[in-house]
Image: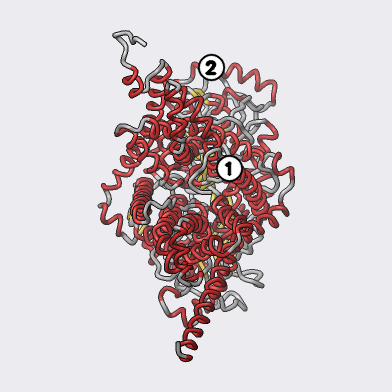
Amino acid sequence: MTPPTTSPSPSELIRRRHLGPGDPVLAWSVRLLSLAALAAVALMLLDTITRSADLLQVTSVWDFLVGQRWAPASVVFGALPFLYGTLVTSLLALVIAVPLALGAALLINEYLPRRIGGPFSYAIELLAAIPSVVYGFWGITVLVPLVRPVQDGIAGSALGALPPFAGPAPGPSYLVAGVILAIMILPIVTSVARDSIAATPRLQREAALALGATHWETIRHVVLPFARGGVFAGIILGLSRAIGETIAVLFVIGNLSEVNASIFSPGSTLPSVIAAQFAEATGAFHREALVALGIVLFVLSFGVNVLARVVVGRFERQAGGADVR
Amino acid sequence: MSADTATRLRGTAARRRTTDRVILAVCALAGIVAIIPLAAVIGFLVVEGLKAWTPAFLVEAPRGVTTAGGGALHAIIGTLLMTGLALIIAAPLGIAVALYVVEYRAGRLAIAVRTAVDLVAGIPSIVIGLFVYSLVVLTMGTFSGLAGAIALSIIMLPIIARTSEEMFKIVPRRLREGTMALGMPRWRAVAQVYIPTVATGIMTGIVLAVSRAVGETAPLIFTALGSNFVSTDISRPMSALPLYMFQNALNIGFPAARERAWAAGLTLVAMVLLFNVLGRWLAGRTALPTSRR
Amino acid sequence: MHLDRLTWRPAAAIALALGVTLGACSSGGSSASPTTPDSSQAAGVVDLDQVPSAPDYGTPITASGATFPQPVYETWAQDYANQTGIQISYTGGGSGQGIADITDNVVAFAGSDAPMKDEERQAAADANGTEVIHIPTVFGAVVMAYNLEGVDTINFTSDVIGRIFTGEITNWNDPALAEDNAGLPDQAITVVHRNDGSGTTSAFTTWLCSVSDSWKSALGAERCKGKEIEWPVGLGGQGNPGVASTITTTPGAVGYIELAYGVQNEIPYGNVENAAGNFIEPTLASVSAAANFDTIPEDLTFTASGSEVEDAYPITAATWILVYQEQDKVAPDEGQAQAVVHFLLWALNDGGDAAEGLDYATLPDQLREAALAKIGTITWDGTPVVDSLY
């Protein structure tokens, strides 16, 4: 084959992988579309930031973040009640969901025969598919009436003397929101935990058994240390989901813009207050303040997601490249 | 070994066995407790939903949230229209982004795009609704089904992009090398070999994204707003099934609204589960060995 | 206003000619000379007590706003759509949402129980180049709804209400309540109020601020009334429906909602002491009694509560529809302006039965005439829209 002097050599062609007129079309259309996606994201961020920048006329960033009082009518905007609410509900959700998820993951992977374990894990993952409006509605019609006497009872008992359990407990509360969030993040944490438990090297497991370890001892000394990273990643993914959940929380948290020590007290989270107040925020700077809350929420979620990536990366390397995805 | 040691060892062995069994019981308990919410939610949904649900619910026009009677036809049409439009926007974009990141790996643009898509994945859906409100609704001067579709497409994009990216990544080397050996131009290789190979996987991503979009409420509140009439006009406000359920759920003091909320919930979950199960089934049929199963 | 009439007179002359022809066909009683500017009726020859035939308009119209009149607006919209084929979707959201949406011009009209404040009117006018006008539609009652088993009725004095909402009175068996009520149980009171920018809140707190010293001193004269309040105690609900559903699901709760919500959701509500010292039950009759006025301000906004009439319900509130005057500046096409104006005429003329069926009182005659005249001032390119309808 004698290539014409003006066209590139075969090796050049292979390197550039440009063998026809269609290639530039594909390359450019893909590039353009990706650029469009990038531009859209940048536009959204820019628009949000500029919209809320006006808020700096009435408050500083610090005052906004730590202010305890949210009173749009008096043009006072403090985000602390919502940061607090988001923190408390997410923490409660993790406290409830993580042990359950771990237990369920161990059950499915270690103890149940595949025939039962398969459908069982499928069922848990179905929980993730249920829309949050359904959870919210179920929460207010079924869960709140169920939990109200329990909350009342505890608040009225000796335990009620402690601040986290103090009354009054009208029904919607941080606790109920935490429970609903726990139900919603259970599938994610279980699924990721399952994956990392399943990825434990057989060799190590069999070695432990050969040494005479019981099943539980194998789990405790071999499986869990290996799965630690993945489980942690799952926890963080669950946290990320819990932070951003809007509609389900809106129904069951009572929408009070205050900080309250008791878990039986109503409250608000960052996304729930935005949903509740945005539509008719006509007062001075009210909309800007809510958009600013949106930015805080976004930064929080982003931070958690970055953390998840870092943790997964680190443990992926530690576990010798075991696939924990 | 002495009798003493033997006894002690036997005792320890017994203790270890007991611990083993206790842990099993604890895990079993955890598993049962984990499954109770699903049973409870689906159970109530089915029981209460069937009380209120009739086939007429799916085809009847609405009356108004505070008025008795009426069905969800407008909401179902709205969901289908907006999700369909969102899909048309998000699928090509998502696949293109994935293709770009995997095939044209070089360059800061690829990294920027990937980071941007990951960023979007982490934005709470209500914040996305706010974005689209100020970018689209205020510009158009009206709430609209189009704005709702755009909001949904932003939510769907990362799911489709990520799944497609994973799929393109695991196209076997042999296949790639084969296309090069045959002297295929890249666009041909992509169109005629890679995409068909991972088509099932991409479909899975698309179906899962649709399943997610069908259930979203928060981004529609500020964009599509909702409506009390049946309409196919996307330049005007539109209802959607989760939005319809939400508006009725806010009015549970009205017995009619409460019933409609349950019926809508049942319909919605049935739809979402259908898509979800479909997606998972497709994932199981992928031609390529994936990292899981 | 006078100058405006002079400038559109040439165009009006043509419209008037048409109007006279139509007027002759429809009914008697509509007469005017084409050259005399009539100051009692803003639109020359047309008789706004007769609803003209509906324009042909197929695009759905969006409206949002107060949940206070939502039951009646939804019913009106359905009846209107059945009669004329014009679809008007009223999606509620609260007076605050209505005001926000009309300012952003994303709805054709808005509902609000609180007249727009001066800053809000200015903002809307600045954004759209035309003024917002307020059209009163119906009167409703703000009732004190509660959740107590086995208690048929409660008598509330204004002082008691004020002290409940400041958090001073915390149990139903408080002596202040026992004064006017027998046998109230030992149950903690949970206050329920509005979360969102609410005209209902505005009506309620305007009244409360004027009659309850404890409320006024607790919040200060400035902050004791308005659409959004910094509530000392209580749970928040979204819209009238949100408060209603919170009350029904919380034992011992008390809150303020519109009468129709109480009736339709079967929530018990109490009698409230009025300025004349009587405990009045909120009914169509007692609301109508409160709705009579001697003088009507030019912009048709006023406070309806605190009436001194013997059997008037004290917490009565009017609700308005907000719409821009110069529709050509805000509406996408003339058809929408015509449809909106026609709907308003229809509502004020033919909507009374539906409203009263839901326990809303219709406007007394003088107010109704003024409202109709106001509708006649809505223009398209300088011409009143009503001219093109009749």
Callouts 1 and 2 in the same chain: no
Which chain does the residue under circle 1 lie in? Answer: B
Residue found at the very far front of the displayed protein: B1
Query: Residue at the spot x=45%, y=70% of the render?
Result: A211
- Between A164 and A115, the one nearer to me in the picture: A115
Q: Quadrant of the C terminus of chain C?
A: top right
Q: Position of residue A58 (x, y in %)?
A: 27, 50
What is the distance, in whole Å, between disc 1 and disc 2 at their CAs?
Answer: 68 Å
In this picture, residue C165 sits left or right of residue C217: right
User: Residue C56 placed where, x, y %?
Assistant: 63, 24
Q: Chain of mark 2?
A: C
Q: Which mark is residue B279?
A: 1
Residue at 48% across / 55% down in the picture? A195
- Determine whether A212 is above or below A26 in the image: below
Percent x, y of residue A313:
35, 51
- Say which quarter of the image contains residue C81: top right
Q: Position of residue B155 (x, y in %)?
A: 47, 41
* Number of disc labels: 2
Regarding residue C240, the answer to whether it shows in the image is yes
Q: What's the residue type where badge 2 is placed? A: Ala
- Mark 2 is surrounded, within 10 Å at the Cα level, by few (under 14), some (14 to 19) or many (20 or more) other residues, namely some
- Quarter location, residue B271: top right
Marker disc for residue C13: 2
Q: Is residue C356 above or below residue A37?
A: below
For the point 44% across and 44% down, the residue is C116
- Closer to us: B75 or A258: B75
- Answer few, some or many: residues within 10 Å of disc 1's Cα (few below 14, many 20 plus, some between 14 and 19): many
Task: Report helix, strand or loop for mark 1.
Answer: helix
Seen from the viewer's position, the closer of residues A142 and C248 is: A142
Q: Secondary structure at mark 2?
A: helix
Seen in the picture, residue B218 relative to B181 is either above or below; the reply is: below
Type of colouring: secondary structure
